[in-house]
Amino acid sequence: MGKINRDNVVNIVVQLLKQAETTLPGDVLSALKSARKRESNPLARMQLDMIHKNADFAREKGIPMCQDTGVPIFFIEIGRDAKIDFDLEGAIRDGVVRATEEIPLRPNAVHPITRQNSGNIGLGLPEVNYDFVDGTDINIAVAVKGAGSENMSALKMFLPSEVDDVKRFIVETVKNAGGKPCPPIIVGVGIGGTFDRAARLAKKAALRGLDTAPDKLERELVDAINSLGIGPMGLGGDTTALKVNIEYAHCHVASLPVAVNIQCWADRRASAVLEG
Ligand code: SF4
């Protein structure tokens, strides 16, 4: 998708945000379709049809699929031999500003105390995460996260002796969220690490997509969550979660952090590679 230079980064950020905001990824669409086939509750089937119609309409018209266009979170993989002779983060910010005007996006960023609006950039926004990988390319991935699902996140520092309570905590978090995060949801869980690492793992898990094979705990959790009966948009039904994704990290012998990050049905993400 082009070479590594400042203009290309700005353009790619605009294109990726447009794609993420308007086009629901294929894995989510097919999971919603399968859920529709399995769903026994007529009202839930109707909600799933509405979600599908909404997604089709947004894609066809090139407009955001939800009025809460979220805040962008970038995940940048930089090849160890990539040559970057410009301000990469500045280019990403410029792309966000242009996307806000051109798509357009709702200006969602405010100062936490004064609530003064700053568009979609500000202190610490957009959030940019970096990883180094082999090669000369840069992979730019973006996800946009709305407040309805983000506000339902939770983190708890368990004692190691409380390991059996972890499952209950995750299911309770989803139960307390009810219809607020616009189900069907994807539940991201971070287990282990430190206080902050658990939260980052949960976010990574929530945005991982639906294609990975579930482990035993992920399967048990998705069954337990779907048996809550919250259903699409919280109006009842068999489909509350499309998937549970867990990311693990080793932790201190005396601690057991667990974080839950919920992603709504509008699982908006896109990525592209710039060649070195
Ligand atoms: S939770 Fe998701 S679908 Fe619901 S209003 Fe927020 S961004 Fe939109």
Image (cartoon, helix red, strand yellow):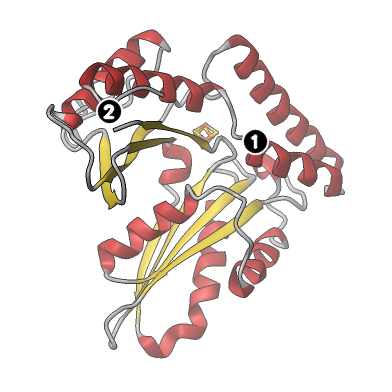
In this picture, residue 78 sits left or right of residue 89: right
In this picture, residue 259 sits left or right of residue 7: right
Answer yes or no: is residue 229 visible: yes
In primary-sequence order, the first of circles 1 and 2 is: 1
In this picture, residue 227 sits left or right of residue 175: right
- 190 or 50: which is nearer to us? 190
- 36 or 201: which is nearer to us? 201
Q: Amino acid type of disc 1?
A: Gly
Q: Residue at x 30, y 19 (%)?
A: 8
Q: Position of residue 162 (x, y in %)?
A: 43, 86
* Comparing labels 1 and 2, the label whose residue is closer to the camera: 1
Q: Quadrant of the N terminus?
A: top left
Q: How many other residues sit within 10 Å of disc 1, few (<14), some (14-19) or many (≥20)?
A: few
Q: Position of residue 270 (x, y in %)?
A: 47, 33
- The secondary structure type at the circle numbered 2 is loop
In this picture, residue 101 sits left or right of residue 49: left
CA–CA distance between discs 1 and 2? 29 Å
Which residue does the numbered mark 2 point to in the structure image? 109
Which residue does the numbered mark 1 point to in the structure image? 26
**Quick check: marks 1 and 2 in contact, CB under 8 Å?**
no
Q: Position of residue 248 (x, y in %)?
A: 42, 70
Q: Position of residue 29 (x, y in %)?
A: 68, 36
